[in-house]
Structures are given as C-alpha cells and as structure tokens.
C-alpha cells in the first residue's frame, strides 16, 4: 500500500535546515561502517550544507554522491557538483563526482551509474528539493526520465537553464532508506498543497517507490 509523504513543519528556513542536519547527523552516528549521502543542488540546501561541512566531526566513512545535475562542467556556477565540492571538499568524505565530458549526456550518465554501482553498497540518505512544478531531482513532469524503469541514472532533456540534465531515476531513489525533501519559502506553498493528492506529479510518483519520505518545510498548508 502506498504510504503518504510525511510533512514536518518548522518555523523558518533556518530551523528547517537545522532539523534536517540534526536528523542526518544522528543517522550517521548510529550507522555501522560506510554511509552514503545523496545531495542535490540549488539555493535551498546551501545553509544545510554549510552546517554539515562545518559541524560534522567525522565523515571519513561517508560517500557523498550527486542526485542530479545540469550537464555542464563542474566549474560552472549552474553545476550542482560545484556546489557539493565547495562545501565538502575540505571534509573527510569521499565525494563521488559526476564527470562531465562534453561528448554525450547519455554516456556521462551511464558512467556515473556505473561509478555509483561499483562504490555504494547501500543508499542511506538523500536530500532533495521540490520544484514549483512538482519535480524532484531532475525528474520533471512529462520528461522521458520519469518513465525509465531500467536505469538508475539517466540523461534527461529538459531545456530549463540547460538543455540536458543527468539524474537519478525513481528506481534509484527507491533504493534510498530515508529521503528528506527540503521545501521552504512562500513560493513552495502552492505545490505543497498538491502533495499526497491524486495528481501524477513526480513528487507524488515517488511514493510508489519509497515509503520513507519526509518533506521539511516552513509553510502551513
């Protein structure tokens, strides 16, 4: 049976970020051995990433992987990999970097899928965002990647800021033990009202693959 997404309310963006960081810190401390953490990009998680990089005492057993990215060079300001590198390159974490070759988004996605499969045994936690159109990762409404059932990581043509993006599929997101979705700000209020409805938005499709999803927001809906 499909389980509704849990929605956790905090007072503001800062307290929402602190909640997510503390939850992940607790999970890392309780874990035995290796821990994997999937991260997305955008402006919303910057404060959380800054806190994590400055306060997490030991990330030596943690592998950080990129949930999705624009198909651009890692040095590009639009790159999620750039954001992740900025905050975590000075930590002890192993950063599983997405490599942009400039040749083919499909082949680059396939190479990253292989890298993920060869490196990560279990997918513990991921932080995702929520777009105003209901997209998660780079799984946009009506894009081809949302119907992919064979791959874990694919190229997706979206034509939003960049023509191509690469992204974890629902198949991969469904392997993650705990998904936190950080969705703060008044611009997220309308889309949050569509969560747990009968709409086929990607955020609701995710429920078919995972039963441990928590949206953390500062919006009363």
Image (cartoon, grey):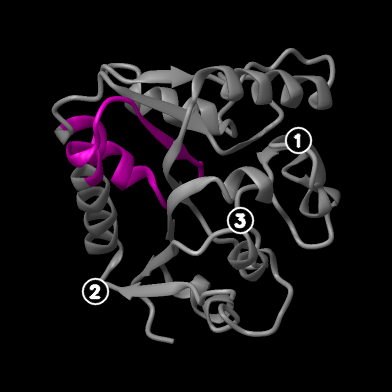
* The disc label shown at residue 136, or none: 3
Residue 98 versus residue 142 in the image, above or below: above
Q: Nearer the viewer, residue 69 or 117?
A: 117
- Residue in view at x 61 percent, y 49 percent: 137
Quarter holding the N terminus is bottom right
Q: Which residues are magenta?
A: 27-54
Magenta span contains residue 20? no
- Whole-angstrom CA distance, mark 2 to mark 1, is 36 Å
Report whether 1 appears left or right of 33. right
Q: Residues within 10 Å of mark 2 (few under 14, many from 20)?
A: few
- Say whether marks 1 and 3 touch (CB < 8 Å): no
Q: Mark on residue 154?
A: 1
Q: Residue at x 51, y 72 (%)?
A: 187
Tell me the SS state at disc 3. loop
State the CA–CA distance, disc 2 to disc 3.
Answer: 23 Å
**Is 156 above or below relative to 83?**
below
Query: In the figure, residue 146 lies in which quadrant?
Result: bottom right
- Counting from the top left corner in percent of width and height, residue 35 is at 34, 31
Earlier residue among tags 1 and 3: 3
The answer to whether 199 appears left or right of 27 in the picture is: right
Q: Earlier in the sequence, mark 2 or mark 3?
A: 2
Q: Pinpoint residue 172: horizontal percent, then vertical percent.
A: 62, 42
Left or right, 177 with reference to 102: left
Q: Is residue 130 above or below residue 94?
A: below
Q: Which mark is residue 11?
A: 2
Q: What is the secondary structure assignment of the residue under circle 1?
A: strand
Q: Earlier in the sequence, mark 2 or mark 1?
A: 2
């Amino acid at each position: 049976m499909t389980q509704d997404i849990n929605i956790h309310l905090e007072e503001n963006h800062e307290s929402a970020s602190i909640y997510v960081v503390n939850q992940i810190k607790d999970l890392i401390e309780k874990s035995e051995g290796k821990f994997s953490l999937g991260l997305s990009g955008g402006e919303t998680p910057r404060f959380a990433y800054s806190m994590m990089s400055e306060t997490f005492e030991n990330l030596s057993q943690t592998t950080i992987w990129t949930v999705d990215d624009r198909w651009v060079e890692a040095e590009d300001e639009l790159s999620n990999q750039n954001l992740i590198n900025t905050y975590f390159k000075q930590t002890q974490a192993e950063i599983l970097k997405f490599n942009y070759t400039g040749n083919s988004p499909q082949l680059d996605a396939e190479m990253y899928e292989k890298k993920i499969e060869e490196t990560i045994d279990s997918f513990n936690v991921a932080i995702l965002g929520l777009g105003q159109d209901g997209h998660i990762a780079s799984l946009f409404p009506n894009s081809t990647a949302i119907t992919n059932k064979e791959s874990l990581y694919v190229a997706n043509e979206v034509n939003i800021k960049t023509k191509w993006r690469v992204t974890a599929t629902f198949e991969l997101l469904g392997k993650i033990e705990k998904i936190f979705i950080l969705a703060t700000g008044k611009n997220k209020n309308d889309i949050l009202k569509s969560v747990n409805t009968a709409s086929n938005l990607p955020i609701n499709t995710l429920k078919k693959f995972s039963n441990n999803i928590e949206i953390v927001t500062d919006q009363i809906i």
